[in-house]
Image: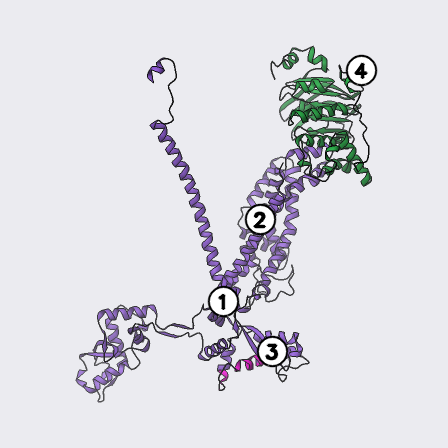
Amino acid sequence: MSDAAIGGVPPVREFASAESNRRVRRRYAADRRLQAYGIIAIGLAVGLLGILVTSLVVTGFPAFVQTKVDLATFVDPAKVDPKDPAAGNYRGLVRDALASFMPADATDKQKTEVTKILTSDAPYIVRDYVVSHPDAIGKTITVPIAMSDPFDQLNKGVIPKEVDALSWSQVRYFERLQNRGVVVEEGGRTSLKLDVYVDPAKIEPGPPPTGDCAALARDSLQAYLPDVHDTALFAMLADDAPDAIAKLVASDPNLIGKTVQVSFPFSAPFAELAEGKSPKVPNPRFTPSQIEAFDAMTAKGIVHMPFNWELFFNADSRFPERAGLAGAITGTFLMLLVSFALSFPIGIAAAVYLEEFAPKNRLTDLIEVNINNLAAVPSVVFGLLGLAVFIGFFGLPRSVPLVGGMVMSLITLPTIIIATRAALKSVPPSIREAALGVGASKHQVMLHHVLPLAMPGILTGTIIGMAHALGETAPLLLIGMNAFIPSIENMGILEPATTLPTQIYSWADSPERGFVSRTSAAILVLLGFLVIMNLLAVVLRQRFERKW
Amino acid sequence: MEARPVIRVEAPALPEKQEGALPAEQHALKMAARDVNLWYGEKQALFDVSLDILDSSVTALIGPSGCGKSTFLRCLNRMNDVIEGCTITGDITLDGQDIYAPQVDPVQLRARVGMVFQKPNPFPKSIFENVAYGPRIHGLATSKADLEEIVVTSLTKAGLFEEVKDRLQESGTGLSGGQQQRLCIARAISVNPEVILMDEPCSALDPIATARIEALMDELKENYCIVIVTHSMQQAARVSQRTAFFHLGKLVEVDETAKIFTNPTDVRTQDYITGRFG
């Protein structure tokens, strides 16, 4: 090769030299590394999203079904006047109907307890049925009535019928005593063999010896676990445990002041635990008569779980089994309507002026920068502004979709203006020139050609802005749009309302168990609306996208 | 619709006219530019351009890129008005009227001075709508039948009607490049202009489509005054009767096409047409 070089021929450049191979390898490695980072990032995002949606679905799923009882109710003409069915004693009717699931000698208290299996609205459900079917008076009707929240949860298995009798720490104490070797088996039963100092200060020698044997027993148990300061520990001793000391001391008064070994019997749950079982007690939330009636209903096969349409068609309620999203959905719709009606024309007008007509000077630059900044202002600030200006200064009512929509249009305006300007910019200048060339005036170019071509982009921006407004919560809380709306009648843009996100907020705050799943269900509904809106934006973009 | 015989332009008798452009005196003066200077912001793009444009003929503007020929063309129908920071001095007249006079509305001017652009730019609407748009906004048609007649006439004049008569409702952007350009010409003549400005109308077309457009220009010059900007000297030689050579924003020379291409006065013209620069 060097000979050839001397002869004037350039050296042959090799693809396969060690140096170049190394460079190529390094470059490939860098390429792969970059790809891997991307894949990891996407995987992470998708994974987290999956976890979120899965947890929402798992938590929210129970809210989409509702436990109901097909309660056969005799509409007693003595309690419901056929002339005025709305005023009847429906509470009494329901109580009578429930009597068939109770023993004949049930007390009033038990009857009241059993009434609580059904939702508190049960009399109104029956009333509404009778009012719309007046010929039912004197007959037995079967109306599906929602169960109250605890029993709904019981039926869904969220709340168990029996709970662990012992707490985790109690089991732990037992295990520690077991390790000390004081849990022994004697005569076929397990008992606790403890050293007891028969304290003369606590026992009078008698005869017969008297004193606080229970305290003695507790002290001796405490002596084995000196670090435990928990009265739950003493639940380990059976009620008759102190008798063991009393008996011992009675048989030999000389033991006072000495230390003796005493075998204490375990209380029932600990005795079970000692046998290796996990002791259970009935759930203290429910009374025996309630459980009995519930079991009777289940056995009769009248308890079922249909799809919970009330979730969509009922307004809010204090009782989770009756609470629905209709009020929130209506309120959201009204608010978005106001917001759209304000921000769409204003946004387009502002964008068209800035993009097409405004002179390029410092003032328009300033306006432009500020519009972009508006998009970054925290929404709670807009809420405060709405509170101060729309409600405080203009004196508009609180909690109403009109004010909510006005605040939301402040939030969506920057999005719409920016999207509209981008859409206007993307219309090729050749179209403007073509229109100008045939003698269209500036506004004709705008209205006939540029705006129609930009419309898909504008609509996409608007829908994304609306989707943003749909999820906003903070400004609505400030203007009070988290009202409790128990009925969707009388809803209007000047009536108090609530919205989906604020409804989620108030449900998440509620202590009832049923609201846990309903909150997740409401989030799923909200996400559903968001997905629909974003899909709409995508469809619009693809359907009307023009190629030049 | 297709039954209407509306062809006004007749093709024969052209060849002998093409031989050596007609002497300038035989054509009426249509547009005249006097001492036109133009600035884009600080930058001067045209320097004292004075040019006569004669009726019923094709005037070609040639010159290297950036010499100001397109800029000058766009002055003729005030398309430069929409460009920010563009200032213009001097006079441009159409039939003796100053087109930059305050009482002249650019929109009305553009109805008389139509324009065809470099890249075919039909509206993304139907073929019919493309042509009907101009007459509609200028109120040239009083009835639907009127409008249809204008559309058919314009398409026929542009030599496109036979090709598209069955699909007038289809999108104008679906046509081929050459067809699109002829559609744009039809659109330009639909408002019955007196002058048609063409800014490199064939630069985006293949040779066959170019030939069609050039033949069309020959037909159209019977009734219209045509000004064309072109980079192709062959095209200028083929279609124009008068040629103006621009260089660095100045009008170097204007004369009958035959003279410019055979015996130019200025050495820069000579250098350009022989390919020494440009």
Residue A93 magenta-drawn? yes
Q: What is the three-letter code of the residue carrying label 1? A: Gly
Which labelled disc corresponds to residue B203? none
Q: Is residue B203 above or below residue A262?
A: above
* Same subunit: marks 3 and 1: yes
Mark 3 or mark 1: which comes first in sequence?
Answer: 3
Quadrant placement of the C terminus of chain A: top right
Q: Please tell me whether mark 4 or mark 2 is closer to you in this view.
A: 4
Which residue corresponds to the image point at 67% horizontal and 11% vertical from the top-left? B266
Q: Percent x, y for residue A371? A: 58, 43
The image's mark for residue B25 is 4
Horizontal arrangement in the rendering, residue B221 relative to residue B274 (left or right): right
Circles 3 and 1, Cβ within 8 Å, touching? The answer is no
Q: Is residue A95 found inside the magenta-colored segment of the image? A: yes
Look at chain A in the picture and name its colour.
purple
Q: Give the side of residue B254 with respect to residue A294, left or right.
A: right
Residue ID for mark 1: A514
Residue A278 position, x and y percent, is 34, 72
Amino acid at circle 2: Ile
**A67 or B52: which is nearer to us?**
A67
**Distance from the alpha carbon under mark 4 to that under mark 2:** 65 Å
Chain letter, disc 3 residue: A
The answer to whether dots 1 and 2 both sit on one chain is yes
Label 3 and label 4: CA atoms lie apart by 107 Å
Q: To which residue does mark 3 refer?
A: A141
- Mark 2 Cα within 10 Å, few/some/many (few <14, many 20+)? many
For the residue carrying disc 4, how many other residues have a C-alpha within 10 Å: few (<14), some (14-19), or many (20+)?
A: few
